[in-house]
Amino acid sequence: MQKIFGNKTGSSKKALLLGAGFVVKPTLTHLSENGVEVTVACRTLESAQKLCKDVKSAKAISLNVEDEAALDAEVEKVDVAISLIPYTYHPLVIKSGIRKKVNVVTTSYTAPAMVELEKEIQEAGITVMNEIGLDPGIDHLYAIKTIDEVHKTGGKIKSFLSYCGGLPAPEASDNPLGYKFSWSARGMLLALGNPAKFLEDGNTKEIPGKDLMSSAKPYSTGYTGYAFVAYPNRDSTPFREKYNIPEAQTVIRGTLRYAGFPEFIKTLVDIGFLSQDPQDFLKPSDNPPPWKEATAKTLNSSSSSENDLTWAISSKTTFKDTDEKKRVLAGLRWIGLFSSDPIIPRSTPLDTLCATLESKMQYGPEERDFVFLQHRFEIEHKSGEKEMRTSTLCEYGDPKGYSAMAKLVGIPCGIAVMQVLEGKLGKGLLAPYSEEICAPLRAECEKFGIEMVEKTVA
């Protein structure tokens, strides 16, 4: 008789967890507490061992996922492979799962490279579950809930807005960006240069990456204690179909940041500090130049004096008013761009800037992070009555436990892995876009206090 799980060796369920990031530990702990034997695989054994410390039924290995034979050897020992490594590597893991007929779970969007494997996934008879973290993940679970409820009563979703922000808690937002890094500064800054596309009042609108920060606007969440600005994130247009809301005239998914963030980033873009072009004066060196000289060369300034640097900056960007100019220049001064401190040279303006930001903008030992996620639905009921409804999640991290981001990505992922192991999800390439998939995941998330709260606001 074929076992549903534990079909490799022994009778217990087994998982391979790939990754070393901060979201790994909640997933690992959830699986361990549910009796799953987990092998944690990182490029370095030390990273894996650190994650496994004090976790029962967990073992650490070193693994390079680009080594196909080594990856296959580990995948074939387990019932599910969890890929919490950068999304570009997910197809390698999925291909291994196909070869060894092993299920795969990721928290990332279902990328075109994954869709190309859909036929092989189906032929292998495995489950590949994606988009089950925070955003994407929890956002889908509660968008589908409300949309499904409205449709079942004959109503329509006329407008759908969804904004999410992973931020320092207000008391920890003590720098010019109002932001701190728990992941790659480079990844965050590069995302700010992506173009955006969305539906608004029945029209498709596009914003070039260079103009994204200029498009940011104050966003009222209904919680007046928070001063957020919002800007659109990548391409929102496919979500009209994914969420089955063809009646929607507006569909925008975006990002929340504290007020002041976009103007600061816009200045960095305008003066060339997000450039990925290598520069000779930024090459790694035993005798790196001071920041003011690197800034002068980046700006083509006539000298490295602060007066000349501020004049050069003013010639390359625009400010709304004098107060904004003073605030942004004070922020650049805080970073150190006008200082005699040596740079940490990393070849490009972007990477050199990131090295300094990462050193100055880390979370302190007692500081909390904060996640705010909100959907805003404009509903037209069957009766013709209009309703504005929000669905909101607000979560603070625990300095002595998980960060808010780690909990909200790692726990839903662990829950989805358990549902795969228990045979509760179907086979094929999946993501949480149906109530059949979303409802059981929501129910489990709510046991951990992970829930979006609905409210009629108009």
Image (cartoon, rainbow, N blue to C red):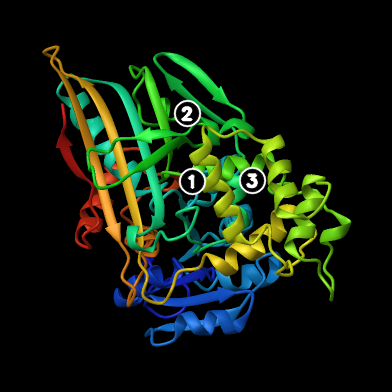
- Most distant residue in the bottom direction: 54
Mark number, residue 238: 2
Q: Which residue is mark 1?
A: 261
Q: What is the x, y in percent for residue 231? A: 46, 35
Could you say whether the residue bearing mark 3 is in a helix, strand or loop?
helix
Q: What is the x, y in percent for residue 235? A: 52, 31
- Nearest to the eye among marks 2 and 3: give it: 3
Pointers 1 and 3 in contact (CB under 8 A)? no
Q: Which residue is mark 3?
A: 268
Task: Identify the mark nearer the N-term, 1 or 2.
Answer: 2
Could you say whether the residue bearing mark 1 is in a helix, strand or loop?
helix
Q: What is the x, y in percent for residue 162? A: 36, 36
Mark number, residue 314: none
Q: Amino acid at mark 1?
A: Phe
Q: Amino acid at mark 3?
A: Leu
Q: 411 and 335: which one is in front?
A: 335
Could you say whether the residue bearing mark 2 is in a helix, strand or loop?
loop
